Image: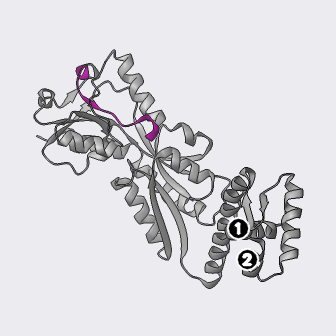
Amino acid sequence: MEFRYMKYFVAVAKAKHFTRAAEQLGMAQPPLSQQIKKLEDELGIALFKRLSRGVELTAAGEEFYHDAQHILQEVECCQRKLEQIARGEKQELRIGFASSTASSRSVLENIRQLHEQCPTLHLIAVEHSMPELVTLLKQQRLELAFLRLPCYASESLKQLILFDDPFVAVTPVSHHLAVHSSIYLAQLHHENVLMFPRDTGPALYDRIEAALHNAEVHIARPYATPQLRTAITMAQAGFGIAIVPLSLTEHLDQSVVIQHLNDMPFVSQVALVWNSHHHHPLISHSIRCMNSSIPKQRGVAGRQQVSEKFEQP
């Protein structure tokens, strides 16, 4: 398929008229119609319904339109990056964050180190759920993402584990369990526990549910929280106990206590994730930069935070 066919197709789809599209492209209408017909013949399916006063997309045309737009946008983005490199201008790196990793000190330290090494780098940050971030990585609409593992969707992607992040309980100070510095899962039996929706992080949700099930714990679920950070806010307001990774508890006030979960059978991990088929020139450099800080962070980050949280008088 010739690349120009897609440009012609998108122009007609937007204008919904061959003559108007031809004018926008700076060509005559008959050759444009011929090129679209060649494209349809090559694909073996009609992309447009010819109407008396223009055209409209078929179901197949609608699908192809979205894909063609994406391809043209990526080509345009690639051309822009190459032009920037040739001119010695700023280079772009699109980075995604799961909501539970966006405010982590360790993650932000990695970003700071990267920017110090590449001061002309222009970082474009977005925040989405983990399944959405994985989709963007696979579509090559992101170069890197900071995800929280386990994550089913990311298993086909490359991963660099940055640090372990153990789970803790965030409990309102008025709660009867707040007097303990650590608790067991069994003590959550019939308590109001604030859980995030499964579609936010299916693997993480399943592991927590399995841990509760294996401990024969049945929790009350009077409230649903959209994400892990919201669960903490609701715990601060006294709605129940939140089970969250330790790194999310860095800036909490005195309305809650943070308690180690003695028998939680797994820890979450924060990872840098990328698509090995995406050949952006800065991906490898960024990975090397962040990989250099792992000996200082991996395992140590979690232990230091535990010490800070649980050894206070």
Secondary structure of residue under mark 1: loop
Residues 279 and 206: in front is 206
Q: Decide: is 33 above or below 220.
A: below
Residue that label 1 marks: 16
Secondary structure of residue under mark 2: helix
Q: The disc labelled 2 sits on which kind of residue?
A: Arg
Q: Could you say which disc has been placed on residue 238 in the image?
A: none
Q: Position of residue 291 (x, y in %)?
A: 50, 54
Q: Does the magenta stretch include residue 142?
A: no
Judge whether residue 203 can be spotted in this image.
Answer: yes
Judge whether residue 304 can be spotted in this image.
Answer: no
Q: Where is residue 101 in the image (x, y as percent from the top left)?
A: 39, 50
- Left or right: residue 42 compared with residue 11: right
Residue located at (81% from left, 81% from top): 27
Residue that label 2 marks: 20
Residue located at (69% from left, 68% from top): 75
Residues 82 and 46: in front is 46
Q: Where is residue 50 in the image (x, y as percent from the top left)?
A: 79, 61
Q: Give the range drawn in magenta.
A: 187-200
Q: The disc labelled 1 sits on which kind of residue?
A: Lys
